[in-house]
Image (cartoon, rainbow, N blue to C red):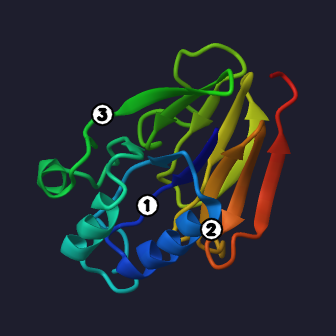
Amino acid sequence: MKILFFSDSHGSTEALGNLTLRIAAEKPDLIVMLGDALYHGPRNALPGKYDAKKAAEMLNIYKKKIIAVRGNCDSEVDQMMLEYPIMSDYSTVWADGQRFFLTHGHIWNGENVPPVTDGTILAHGHTHIPVLEQKHGLIIFNPGSIAIPKQENLPTYGIWDNGILSVRTLKDGSIYREMQLSFR
């Protein structure tokens, strides 16, 4: 199974337009949105081509493929605009025998890990910084932000494909970080 992960689009139609190109190229079976879909929040500058209504329309195209979790900037108003559930603080997905714990990162993250079994992939966003590391018996995976990357990182997204987890650049899909899972 191929899964595309992204986070922190914050209503940027520019970033979502680029993501649409990556989705067409990657052809994922499933798309995981790790929160902060439409609103930029008071701590972030406006992202490129901010248009929450248009961003919702762009995301709704994939409503049958998206599994999403609530980010700290997501609200009930955002849920009214999106045609797939976004209000859960976490979700779990199994793919290729591998468990993924999905959350935004403002509650559960690499420093405050959820009570899950060793070997679980903890996928979260929130920090806008890509991470791919083994820690606390888990794989900590943050695909970064497609719209407002921080600490001089590029806009990035993530891919799970046949036991390989990677962070890729939004511009052209080139591999930014990659890990072959050995405990599968």
Residue at horizontal 42 percent and vertical 35 percent from the top: 107
> Is 142 displayed left or right of 75 in the figure?
right
- Calculate the distance from the C-alpha at mark 1 to the C-alpha at mark 2: 21 Å
Q: Residue at x 15, y 58 (%)?
A: 81
Which dot marks residue 8?
1
Residue placed at 33% from the left, 62% from the top? 59
Please name whichever residue, 149 or 120, is drawn nearer the observer in this view of the structure.
120
Q: Amino acid at mark 3?
A: Ser
**Residue 178 location in percent, x, y?**
81, 51
Cα gap from disc 3 to disc 1, whole angstroms: 16 Å
Q: How many marks?
A: 3
* Picture coordinates of residue 62, whole percent (x, y): 37, 56
Which image quarter is the N terminus in? top right
Label 1 is placed on what type of residue? Answer: Asp
Q: Which residue is mark 2?
A: 25
Residue type at mark 2: give it. Ala
The residue labelled by disc 3 is 88
- Residue 122, how many percent across, how many down? 59, 33
Name the residue located 74 percent from the left edge and 22 percent from the top edge.
137
48 vs 113: above or below: below
